[in-house]
Image (cartoon, rainbow, N blue to C red):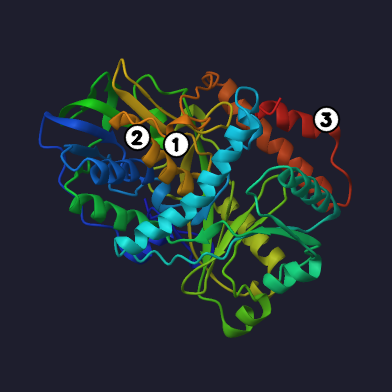
Amino acid sequence: MTGVAEGGTRNGNVSFWWTQLGLPAARAPLPGSIGADVCIVGAGFTGLWTAYYLKRAAPHLDVVVLESEFAGFGASGRNGGWLTNTITGGRDRYLASRSRGEIAEMQRVLNDAVDEVIRVTRAEGIDAGIVKGGELTVATSPAQLGRLRAFAKAEAAWPATDLEVLSAEAATERVAVRGAVGAVWHPHCARVNPAQLVSGLARAVEALGVRIHEQTPVREIRPHAAVTDRGTVTADVVVRATEGFTANLKGQHRTWLPMNSSLIVTEPLGDDVRDEIGWRGRELLGDFAHVYMYAQRTADDRIAIGGRGVPYRFGSRTDSDGVTQEATIRKLRAILTDFFPSAADTAIEHAWSGVLGVPRDWAATMGLDPATGIAWAGGYVGTGVTTTNVAGRTLADLILGHDSALTRLPWVGHVARKWEPEPLRWLAVQGIYAAYGAADRIERAGRPRTAAIARIADVVAGRH
């Protein structure tokens, strides 16, 4: 349900991106039980990229996409618009079982995937407001500066990271964040309007002959079948591309935890605020806080800024329309004005939230089980705008039986243990963010975080 928050801020309506673009006219639902070569469950980035590359490689395939609402309703149409090269969960997640060379190849693939998405948008005539300005991550306290230096040292030990360490002056020259004491920047990141990208991609796959049936929730995925209230689609391969909504499928309640993330967006900035802030390179902006923020300067000169509000709803309940808690809006507003005091009088025009998929080990996964014909990809933990493109190409190769560099990447076939049952699942997430929040408050007060708080957060998050 769409509402109005304090100060007249629009709240919900899926996302600002969709409100600005206009919610799409509904495509026809599944007309009844049918057959197909490939059935894809979920019309977000993962599902649509998979359909796109399948039909490009094998035009004869009959590909059907099933979507519970409309294409891009989930995280694909709500995210912060970061087309970046981050390896979900970090490289260490894969070091126990794979070589450094294999993990370094993941980084190269993700670097290239940023450019691949840009290439496809140009080839398909999709205007998604893409500007490749790189990713700027700032430190605003001595403790954050320490983490910045440790991060930069770790990145320097790997190839293809292309990270630059910036002084406080150089960081402020790019984006005038109050109190910045340093930053790092890398070039493999682009700003994007996610709703424009996902809607354009949906049109592109339809033009290739893919059938998209909306308003068709899938209740269960079985071997070679996707079961809905409107009928069953039988197929040689069924792709689970449901990300944060995976918990709604029968038997998948504990597979990935649906984590909530929230954003606000300002009204267009005034000339004086734009001049004060700079941000002419349209870099994507983050920080080294434990409960981090992420932001972009939009194509129409707004600031969209996001972070974790209420990170998890008991029982893996998922959001329906993006309505955001008032307390979360106030927290994000405080981050905005702390970073950019000149924006203190700039109105917040819209707030919204969405869910993303979090595996128990916080590592993305993709694969295909030949015995059941069930394929899957997801668990991106908020880094999916780029990774979904890699997933789509990887799933296409797996479905077509191609042994490629993509199908040999470390996350192919990776399986994490299931999340704990309630209330342990809820307590785990509350523990993570309580510990991180406490650490940030301690650091803002000028005191070092305690080892106990750091250890609690790392253990609950699966880092040890």
Q: Amino acid at mark 3?
A: Ala
Can you say which quadrant of the picture contains the C terminus?
top right
- At horizontal 42% and vertical 41% (from top left) the residue drawn is 319
- Where residue 305 appears, x then y in whole percent? 57, 59
Residue 314 to residue 77: above or below = above
- Where residue 432 appears, x then y in whole percent? 67, 33
Q: Amino acid at mark 2?
A: Asp
Mark earlier in primary sequence (2, 3): 2
Query: Which label was assigned to residue 452?
Result: 3
Label 1 near label 3: C-beta < 8 Å?
Answer: no
Label 1 near label 2: C-beta < 8 Å?
Answer: yes
* SS at mark 3 in the image: helix
Residue sticking out furthest to the bottom: 271
* SS at mark 2 in the image: helix
* SS at mark 1 in the image: helix
Q: Amino acid at mark 1?
A: Leu
